[in-house]
Amino acid sequence: MTNAPISGQVKGPASYFPSIEAKYGQPIQHWLDLIATQTGQPHMKIVGWLKENHGLGHGHANALVAHALSQKDI
C-alpha cells in the first residue's frame, strides 16, 4: 500500500478554503480582494492585518496570504 494522496485532493493553503468560508461566511474571493489592497506589505504584516481588522484566526489568515502571494494576487 502506498501513501500517495487521493487524486484530486486539495493540498496546501487551499485546503483551508472550505473551513474559512464556513467559519467567516464569505467566499474566498472576498478575502483575496481584501488582501490585494495590501500591495507591497510583507506576508506576516498582512496576516496580522487580517487577524486584527477582520477577526481571522492565524492559520486561516496565513493560508489566505500564502495562497494570494503564490498566485501573485497582490
Image (tube, rainbow, N blue to C red):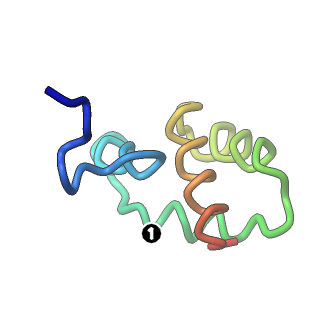
Residue 41 appears in the figure: yes
Q: Residue at the far left: name it.
A: 1
Above or below, 40 relative to 52: below
List x then y, in percent, for residue 45.
81, 45
Give the residue number, with chain letter if any, for mark 1: 29
The front one of 34 and 13 is: 13
The front one of 55 and 42 is: 42
List x then y, in percent, for residue 54.
58, 46
The front one of 17 and 12 is: 12
Instruction: Tell me: 21 left or right of 37.
Output: left
Above or below, 13 relative to 29: above
Residue at 74 percent across and 50 percent down: it is: 46
List x then y, in percent, for residue 34.
61, 65
Residue at 70 percent across and 71 percent down: it is: 74
Residue 24 appears in the figure: no
Q: Secondary structure at mark 1?
A: helix
Residue at 54 percent across and 52 percent down: it is: 64
The crowding category of the residue bearing disc 1, from other C-alpha atoms within 10 Å (few below 14, some 14 to 19, many at least 20), is few
